[in-house]
Image: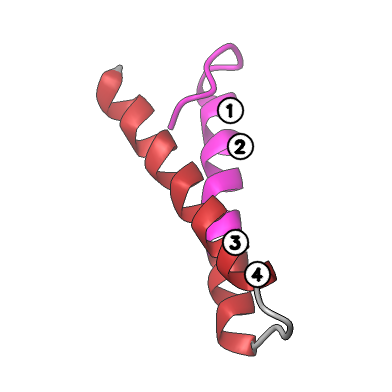
């Protein structure tokens, strides 16, 4: 259980870091945008997969 929680926390941290990097500057470059989209997709895929496997659980 804790390992699954750590995976989820790591995904959330990565997404928040990428979000900060993307929106903290005056301009948005393509590389940062792509990285942000990929980390967001990985994070939200984690929730979708967990919901399919166990509708009550929200861990990876």
Disc 3 target residue: 20
Please determine whether, in this image, residue 25 is positioned above or below residue 42: below
Whether residues under marks 2 and 1 lie with C-beta atoms below 8 angstroms apart, the answer is yes
Q: Residues within 10 Å of mark 1 (few under 14, many from 20)?
A: few
In magenta stretch: residue 54: yes
Q: Residues within 10 Å of mark 4 (few under 14, many from 20)?
A: few
Q: Which portion, as a residue range, is magenta?
A: 39-60
Which numbered tag is attached to residue 13?
Answer: none
Q: Nearer the viewer, mark 2 or mark 1?
A: 2
Q: Nearer the viewer, mark 2 or mark 3?
A: 3
Q: Nearer the viewer, mark 1 or mark 3?
A: 3
Which numbered tag is attached to residue 48?
Answer: 2
Q: What secondary structure is the magenta-colored segment mainly?
A: helix
**Mark 3 and mark 4: Cα distance apart in space:** 6 Å
Q: Position of residue 4 (x, y in %)?
A: 33, 28
Whether residues under marks 3 and 4 lie with C-beta atoms below 8 angstroms apart, the answer is yes
Q: Nearer the viewer, mark 4 or mark 1?
A: 4
Q: Name the image quarter holding the N terminus.
A: top left
């Amino acid at each position: 259980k804790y390992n699954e929680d750590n995976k989820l926390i790591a995904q959330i941290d990565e997404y928040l870091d990428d979000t900060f990097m993307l929106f903290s500057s005056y301009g948005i470059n393509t590389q940062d945008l792509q990285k942000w989209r990929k980390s967001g997709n990985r994070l939200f895929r984690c929730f979708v997969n967990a919901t399919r496997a166990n509708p009550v659980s929200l861990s990876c």
